[in-house]
Amino acid sequence: MPALRDDISDLIETLRPLLRKAAEKDGGRLPPERSMAELLDVPRRRLRLALDELQHQGAVFRRHGQGTFVTPAPHPDKDRHRLLAGRVSLDQLMDVRLQLEPRLAQLAAIHADRDDLVQLEALMRRTREARDPAEYDRADEVFHYRIAELSQNPLFLEIYDLVRGMRREAGWRERRVKTNVPEMIGELGAQHQKIFEAIASNDPDAAGDAVRRHMIFVASAVAT
């Protein structure tokens, strides 16, 4: 068994350049499994085991029928996002996030188990260790998406997925990349740590409050 784990660990390290390359593309989609297996000259079963481990780490996401992504997979109904994007301002988008995301954090604090917290802490640390605005933006998206998943409420997750798609369509990413200077990234990462600590303490009120303060700070930053 240890030999198998070492074998998979080696393959994961081999996959890292593909993950970085995919992260630079819009949508962050990896090549199909068959193409990756042929490129790396490995059996597909071994590749799937490596992708399973990366998914457990929060490094990749899979959506049935769409493939594997280095950030949460885009919602399939892109036309709906584009239609709404023309009618929704960034202020309105932030208002929805301010109402939604504190509740997601409260539920995450209730439901997250030890394994969930290990993964969430790793995702939080990526936001603190990001080397540039684009890297931070990807880490931020994954961190908040994982909190939404930990709510264990599929309807909330569907609503959050819609909001996330709107962020892509409403000029959000461009605004964030311009705004996230190193000192801003440091402050946002520190806020993420407070969110994580509240969730890890199983304190719904503290988790909701930490996210609420974070959302208010972000709204102020993107408005300037």
Image (tube, rainbow, N blue to C red):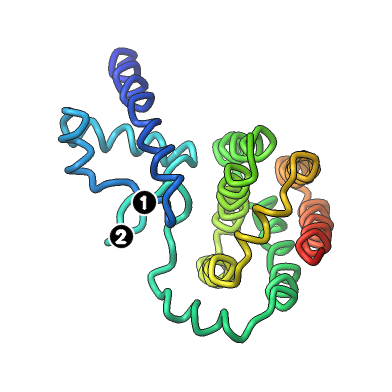
- Which quadrant of the structure image shows residue 97? bottom right
Residue depicted at x 79% and y 66%: 223
Q: Is residue 139 left or right of residue 184?
A: left
Residue 157 percent location from the top left of the image = 54, 65
> What's the residue type where badge 2 is placed?
Gln
Foreground residue among 38 and 8: 38
Residue depicted at x 27% and y 46%: 31
Q: Are marks 1 and 2 in contact (CB under 8 Å)?
A: yes
Q: Secondary structure at mark 1?
A: loop
Q: Which residue is mark 1?
A: 29
Judge whether 212 appears above or below 25 on screen. below
Residue 196 percent location from the top left of the image = 71, 43
- Which quadrant of the structure image shows residue 92? bottom right
* Label disc, if present, on residue 66 of the rendered structure: 2
* Label disc, if present, on residue 108 of the rendered structure: none
Q: Is residue 184 left or right of residue 121?
A: right
